[in-house]
Image (cartoon, grey):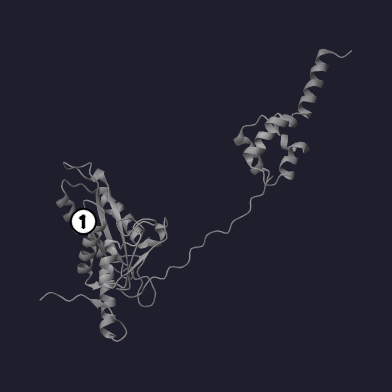
Amino acid sequence: MFSVDHMFALFFRLLLDFSWLFLNPFENPFSLLILKENPNISYSEAYGRLRAEKAYSRTYFGFYQYIVKHNLRPVEEKEKYVPKPYDTPEMLGRKMQMDVKYVPRECNKGEFAEEWLFQYTMIDEATRERFIYPYKEHCGFSTVDFIKRALVHFGYIPEIIQTDNGTEFTNPKGTGEGKVHIVDKLLNKLGIKHQLIRAYTPRHNGKVERSHRSDQECFYNSLTFYSFEELREKMKDWLIRYNNRPHSSLRDKNGKRAWQSPIQKREELLEEIREHKELYHIRFLKKAA
């Protein structure tokens, strides 16, 4: 006869020996067959069959975690995306980027604080010089007005203006078939190529996007205004400061970081144009008499 203590010890030993059947059913050959025989089976289907056929009691998350931990279904490694090097123009007037940024509503302390306002931005890729201007709505008409103001500010007409696919810049795909967007009408008239970036890839407009981050950090985080006119004046002051502060991304003629401001870089390139007029064909605007 076995004593009670001996029976309890034997039962406990058997429980330990066969606990894997309940805790880790994937160690059971019959359970492993589900994945081996069905390499394309979905996780949810495999989990459902285990519950129905093998009395599996883990949660779905525990089931998935176990597969990953023990590498029961190796995941094919996808090639990491390596962005192509961006060809930044070295001369002004070649290419500009344009975008719109929402003015944070918490900055507006005036009577119409709940209304959205918008900052339009244009940046020359070679010099990083910018022009910004506020609007009460972002639409094609605001864009056309902004482009005219920007060209007067820069004093020359670029070869290319690059934008995203927003409706303030272009007609969405599948709409406006055969119609020319009001922005394209202006750009065609001025002989400017309108270059659209790939949809949902704002990094392709990286220079203007990065400048918007500077706007947020160095301007909007400490800005308060009570009227649209006050915002316009403060934005004007910020633009002067931005264009006259050093930028780490700018390089000198030898490709070394020069810590120049956009205005200094502009003057350097203008001097280059004056010395070698035959090499460059920048379309400068004529000054009014």
Residue 40: x, y in percent? 67, 46
The front one of 87 and 51 is: 51
The local crowd at label 1, few if under 14, some if 14 to 19, many if 20 or more residues have their Cα within 10 Å, is many
The front one of 219 and 151 is: 151
Tally of numbered tags:
1
Locate the C terminus by quadrant: bottom left
Quick one: SS at disc 1? helix
User: Would you say 201 lies left or right of 160 here?
Assistant: right
Q: Give the vertical position of 240 relative to 226 (above or below).
A: below
Residue in the picture at 23% in, 51% down: 137
Residue 208: x, y in percent? 33, 61
Residue that label 1 marks: 235
Locate the N terminus by quadrant: top right
User: Would you say 246 lies left or right of 84 here?
Assistant: left
User: Would you say 109 lies left or right of 78 here?
Assistant: left
When asked about the image quadrant of residue 202, the answer is bottom left
Residue 19: x, y in percent? 74, 29
Q: From this viewpoint, which residue is outermost toward the front?
A: 178
Residue in the picture at 23% in, 45% down: 107
Amino acid type shown at disc 1 = Met
**Could one spot residue 121 in this view of the protein?**
yes
The front one of 139 and 112 is: 139
The front one of 238 and 256 is: 238
When asked about the image quadrant of residue 132, the answer is bottom left
User: Would you say 60 lies left or right of 14 here?
Assistant: left
Residue in the picture at 64% in, 36% down: 63
Residue 282: x, y in percent? 27, 78
**Could one spot residue 244 in this view of the protein?**
no
Q: From this viewpoint, which residue is outermost toward the left?
A: 289
Q: From this viewpoint, which residue is outermost toward the bottom?
A: 278
When asked about the image quadrant of residue 258, the answer is bottom left
